Amino acid sequence: MRWFWQRIRANTQSWPGYMAYCAATTSSALLARFYRQGCPDSATPIQDVPLVALDIETTGLDAAQDAIVSIAAVPFTLRRIPLVDRRYWLVRPPSDSLTEQSVVIHHITHSAIEAAPDLMVVLPELLEVLSGRIAVVHYRHMERAFLDAAVRDGLGESLLFPVVDTMGLEAERHRSSLRARLAGFIGRRPTSIRLADSRRRYRLPLYQGHHALGDAIGTAELFQAQIAWRFFRLTPLERLWS
């Protein structure tokens, strides 16, 4: 039946219904607590939605074979980002998954993760921060796919939840719009929708990238700017989430 609810969710944006179904059918007490918290209704104005910026760093780009090495979660609103509530975890991936290439990118070394806990150890804290909030990420196919794969490995069940994807919102304007398509037709290079380049368009300060906490804060700031510049505080959640 889960495939049925996944189709319903995809076609109608019925995330509350999907999460209620998962709460009733999961065999994991941990996931049941998370799903029971549900999520806001799709018609909720974004100004009234509890938000949390979420970012991960990984050993690679393939959720099927790579692993998470750090996670950051920063609860925020459209008005402020209370850093006192930030959370950051180093987690230990499988011993053979940390590569020289990934270390160069995120600077998390073997010695840094030697004493770090397994992801399943910090999962209850992470789910507590995410519970009842809408996660805001920059490229949903990283955070959601990697967490889903990790929970499948650890608990034998899927973990799916709604997110707002700031990269996706940039893509709507700079990759999918008629103007962007015409620019591509005449040979212009596509506009970058990477986090740093997207922030630059909104005149936000540059941070050092590929640190989960810094990127989570940067994503929260980017979303605040996107709402202020391109949307409205009364924009319904269904216009923004996926």
Image (cartoon, grey):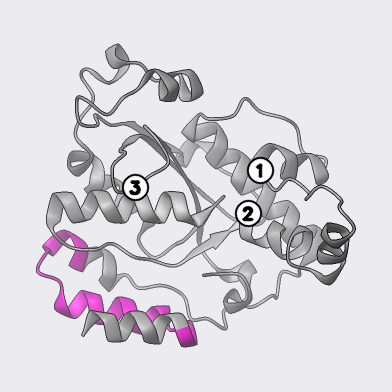
| Label 2 with label 1: CB-CB less than 8 Å | yes
Mark linked to residue 194: 1
- Label 1, label 3: how far apart the Cα atoms are: 20 Å
Mark linked to residue 167: 2
Using the rendered image of the protein, determine whether residue 79 is visible from the camera's viewpoint. no
- Label 3, label 2: how far apart the Cα atoms are: 19 Å
Residue 221 image offset from top left, x and y in percent: 66, 45
- Label 2, label 1: how far apart the Cα atoms are: 7 Å
Residue linked to disc 3: 63
Left or right of residue 120, residue 173 in this image: right
Left or right of residue 41, residue 113 in this image: left
Q: Secondary structure at mark 1?
A: loop
Task: State which mark lies toward you, 1 or 3.
Answer: 3
- Boundaries of the magenta span: 11-32
Earlier residue among tags 1 and 3: 3
Q: Residue at x 73, y 45 (%)?
A: 192
Earlier residue among tags 3 and 2: 3
Disc 1 marks a residue whose amino acid type is Arg
Vertical side of 218 occupied by 183: above or below: below
Classify 10 Å Cα crowding around label 1: few (below 14), some (14-19), many (20 and above).
some
Vertical side of 66 occupied by 157: above or below: below
- Write down the quadrant of residue 39 in the picture: bottom left
